[in-house]
Amino acid sequence: VTRGATSAIYGRGYPGTNGTIPGYDVTAAPVLGSNIGLTIGNSSGQSTAMGILMSGEPARISTGLGGVLLVLGLDGFFGTLPAGGTTLSVHVPNSTALLGANLYMQMVQADAGARFGIAFSRGLRLTFGN
């Protein structure tokens, strides 16, 4: 079975400093067995705390912090985002169980310039292919 690997940005982010919504994207299609770069922008321009949220389902959940959670569930990881942003190298497993599966992701970051102190990226959907 052949399935195309794709990525798509969806939903709205929530701005931080200077009205900037943090950027969030991949450098290549998520092909099984490949390495891709996860490019993460920083709206604050300062080293700050961030979280990458991941789920198999999209969502639209108001947070009370201005932004909307675009992933269902809060699996993911947290870390420090450098002032200039970063690109993380991610290995896509070579597992046919992932073929055609979707992964929904969103990044949130501490940003004193955001109305409630948190900026939200737009959502990122990865569809794994070969």
Image (cartoon, rainbow, N blue to C red):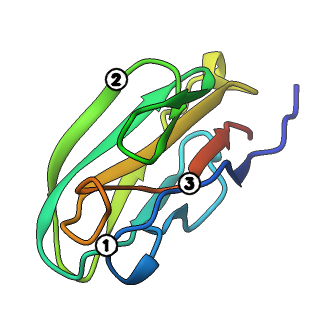
* Badge 3 density bin: few <14, some 14–19, many ≥20, Cα 10 Å: many
Q: Is residue 107 above or below residue 1?
A: below
Residue placed at 75% from the left, 46% from the top? 5
Instruction: Say whether disc 2 or disc 3 marks the residue closer to the N-terminus.
Output: 2
* Badge 1 density bin: few <14, some 14–19, many ≥20, Cα 10 Å: many
Q: Is residue 4 left or right of residue 9?
A: right
Observer-side mark, 1 or 2, equals: 1
Residue placed at 64% from the left, 42% from the top? 126
Residue placed at 32% from the left, 77% from the top? 17
Residue placed at 62% from the left, 53% from the top? 12
Residue picked out by circle 3: 122
Residue picked out by circle 2: 75
In which quadrant of the rendered image does the N terminus lie?
top right
Instruction: Say whether disc 3 or disc 1 marks the residue closer to the N-terminus.
Output: 1
Q: Which mark is residue 42?
A: 1
Q: Is residue 77 above or below residue 1?
A: below
Residue 22 quadrant: bottom left
Residue in front for this viewpoint, 128 or 122? 122
Q: CA distance from mark 2 to mark 3?
A: 17 Å
Q: Is residue 47 left or right of residue 31?
A: left
Amino acid type at circle 2 is Asp
Amino acid type at circle 3 is Arg
Asked if the residues shown at circle 3 and circle 1 are in contact, with their CB atoms under 8 angstroms apart, the answer is no
Amino acid type at circle 1 is Asn
